[in-house]
Image (cartoon, grey):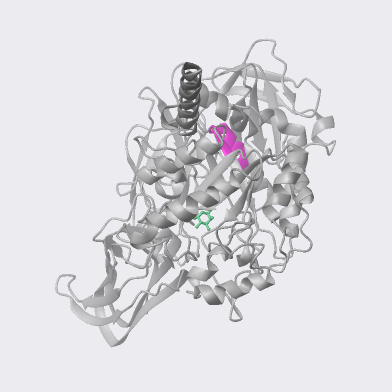
Amino acid sequence: MKIRFISLLFMLMLLFACKEKEANRNYLNETVFDKDARMEWWREARFGMFIHWGVYSVPAGVYEGRNISGTGEWLMSICQIPIDTYKTFSTGFNPQKYNALEWVRMAKNAGMKYIVITTKHHDGFCMWDSKYTDWDIIDATPYKKDVIKEFADACKQEGMKLGFYHSLLDWAHADAKGEKFASYRENYLKPQLKELLTNYGEISILWFDGDWIDEWTNEQGSDLYNFVRNLQPNILVNNRVTKGRNGMQGMSVEGEFAGDFGTPEQEILNEASTLDWEACMTMNDTWGFKLHDENWKTTAFLIFNLVDACAKGGNYLLNVGPTSEGLIPQASVERLNEMGEWLNRNAEAIYGSKRTDIKIESSNMRYTQSKTNKHIYATVFGTLSDSVVLKSVSPLSGSKITLLGFDENLKWRWDNIYGLVIYIPENLKNGGKLSTIANVFKMEATVAKVTQSPVISTIEFSDVKKALFNQKEEIILTSINDDAEIFYTTDGSIPNLQSTKYISSFEISNSCTLKTIALSKGAIISSVSEAVLKQCNTFSRLDLKNKPSVNYPAQGYLTLADSARGSLYFKDGAWLGFESVDFEADIDLGKSKKITSVSTGFLQDLLSAVFLPIEYTVFLSHDGINFREAGKVNHTLDKNEMQQIRTFKIDIKPTKARFVRIVAKNVAQCPDWHSGAGGKASLFADEIIIE
Ligand code: FHN
């Protein structure tokens, strides 16, 4: 009897140990086979909905009667609203028109295969019934119903994969900063994640955010990754669980970082990647609902991003920001419906599709291929004309080429210089059934070798698309295919094999549009690359002491004198960006002039670590050697100025001079109050005006 009791006890202890071991499994050494199996559905899904919903939809970007620039969900931080004041907004969160089923069906109808909804954003408000706080939907709002529960049930009913967004940083929790952070992590963050991963059924994705805070570390991230996977072993966790992310580009840098997929934000990767990644993007300029943000992207642009992501091996997570009443903005509804219509016809080119090894052929074309590699899909954007030329594919002989959504076999011919020409029959072209957004050609084909387009460079800048030059400019054309012959035109006409053949660099002394092609043996002729070269004589000469960042060259130095102004969007190509160095410009006016003021425009965009100058000084000179200070202004950076353009101007007692020097001091490192404290700070300049 005693032996039977001891062996039973031993069995129970063994069972418990196994359970314990199973409950604390280390998923960081998961096999590739297991990971592939776990990621398969997601890799095939390609298209998901992101939902940013919370108390911030009550003020909706307006505070004290002012429209606040920046994204809506950051209002509390942008306006430095004390938490107790901010918490009063929750009394206005009463989404009586909220219909979870309707949202899920809208996503489904749009062709989305999974949804990621915010459970807690940076303001700490919990959209579910949490027993660890009163700052949640049940205790702090008149709505008093668990919206996450309703949403999880609706997803289950509709067979929609559900993911939870959860912010690591928490502006409302007293311990979520400084040395008490460990307590916040162990006694609040983890218990709440356990609630979310225990009480709402199967959760397919955990989408962390806020990884940039100093308190967070890779070790904590690896531990949290395992914590979450042990609660839901099949769940996918994004790479913001650790700190490997390379800024907004979003991919994890080389090295061991937990996280199942990269998260580019507001951008699609420039090149295809073999890694798992998902680009998240807003439909306008905000994640959380803002009353006055009507800067909606077009449906065509959204579909382009989806196809572009797929062609580069990634997913597309498109955001909606519902109102505090519980409605998805009409502009979003319309775009979702239109995307759904397009995907109904072209689903084959997206779901379960794979990237190809084809380099970007042109800006209006992207290629994907079927899971079996049997078919290649060429998505051509814009309205189709009589024929389409595809360079990067060579159809198998006898291959049928069709347009998705149509059964007709299209006529085509292929030759080893110009590639594949597909003819669009009249009945299709004028039948009004073709999409004006994009149409997809389906074929059995192999990838063709295409000569890379030549690169157009000047002495200062390589790979220029637009450049301004003073008197004259030296043009250099290069091709990565050593044996390539290069042909070019300077009158804007499309070059061909009879155009001027490039032998060595040449000079231009008038504005022109330069177009060039290349052809190497056994390859298809390249696509055309072009550069708009504009002569600009505002100043006789403009030199910069520090080179602008290669990421933000704009159109060269003379962008500062092209009478075109940069916008609030730091990547609009009109700003010259300087990373951690001062902006110092020497201008030769060509002859002595009476100067009364010198001004320069600068951008501040705190979310992109772009700051206004902390000092702006102007010097004048007759000989370009001896400079005398003509005026200086100092500027104290303001953390409330999230995004703005400001012109720094020095008024000068009318003074004759030929040379002007402008020095704008860069704060160089992000200030302590900035989320990227200590990191690189940039100075963005545009448009020098000398009166
Ligand atoms: O600060 C957040 C922002 O509010 C939004 O949630 C995006 C979505 O990816 N992530 C952070 C900014 O990188």
Residue drawn at (38%, 54%) of the image: 182
In the rendered image, the vertical position of residue 225 relative to residue 390, given as above or below: below
Q: Nearer the viewer, residue 664 or 26?
A: 26
Question: Based on the displayed image, in which of its 4 quarters is residue 406 positioned?
Answer: top right
Residue 208 seen in render: yes
Residue 555 location, x and y as percent? 41, 54
Q: How many marks on residues?
A: 0
Residue 313 in magenta? Answer: yes
Residue 175 location, x and y as percent? 42, 62
In the rendered image, the vertical position of residue 160 relative to residue 573, given as above or below: above
Question: Based on the displayed image, in which of its 4 quarters is residue 601 positioned?
Answer: bottom left
Q: Nearer the viewer, residue 679 or 134?
A: 134
Residue drawn at (30%, 88%) of the image: 654
Residue 386 location, x and y as percent? 73, 32
Residue 339 seen in render: no
Residue 588 location, x and y as percent? 27, 68
The secondary structure making up most of the magenta span is helix
Quarter occupied by the C terminus: bottom left
Q: Is residue 653 left or right of residue 16?
A: left
In the rendered image, the vertical position of residue 178 relative to residue 619, given as above or below: above
Residue 690 in magenta? Answer: no
Residue drawn at (62%, 35%) of the image: 46
* Magenta highlight range: 304-315
Q: Nearer the viewer, residue 168 or 618?
A: 168
